[in-house]
Amino acid sequence: MVNDEPENRLEVSISADVEMGQYANFASVWHTQDGFVLDFAVITRPPQLANDPSSGQPFVSVPTRIVSRIRIPPSQVFELMKALEQQLTQYENETGSKH
């Protein structure tokens, strides 16, 4: 069977201010009914011991600042997971590193 449909090719461009990217050493993933949210953050200060004001129980406070929030539709989550798995496998093969 011959496919007469032309293939789709994304022509991706990136602006100079986005090209450098943002450093993040923490990520949080959550969802709503409409989609998934990926928050990328950076730890801004060293963790410190603090006390919960309501219970008095100690906890470790880790101050962070979100540097980027990405919202994606549920259908894209599967594609993202596959791409991450492929890139992680390639990274491990190239570096010999298994994290």
Image (cartoon, grey):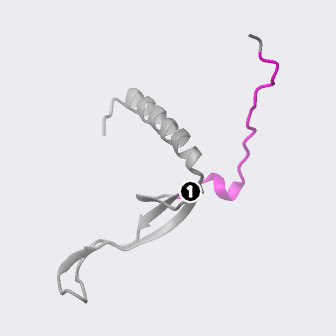
The image quadrant of residue 95 is: top left
Residue 19: horizontal and vertical position, in percent? Answer: 64, 52
Q: Image point 32% across, 72% down: which residue?
A: 62
Element type at marker 1?
loop
Q: Is residue 92 magenta?
A: no
In the rendered image of this protein, does residue 72 appear above or below residue 99?
below
Residue 51: horizontal and vertical position, in percent? Answer: 21, 84
Magenta stretch, overall SS:
loop
Q: Nearer the viewer, residue 47 or 20?
A: 47
Disc 1 designates what residue?
Answer: 35
Position of residue 97 in the picture relative to residue 60 (left or right): right
Residue 94: horizontal and vertical position, in percent? Answer: 41, 28
Q: Image point 31% across, 35% down: which residue?
A: 98
Position of residue 75 in the picture relative to residue 46 (left or right): right
Residue 80: horizontal and vertical position, in percent? Answer: 53, 42
Of the residues shown, which amino acid type is indicated by label 1? Gly
Q: Is residue 5 magenta?
A: yes
Q: Nearer the viewer, residue 55 or 68?
A: 55
Q: Image point 70% across, 55% down: which residue?
A: 16
In the rendered image of this protein, does residue 28 appear above or below residue 5?
below
The image quadrant of residue 79 is: top right
Position of residue 97 in the picture relative to residue 19 (left or right): left
Magenta segment boundaries in residue numbering: 3-22
Residue placed farthest to the top in the image? 1
Q: Quadrant of the N terminus?
A: top right
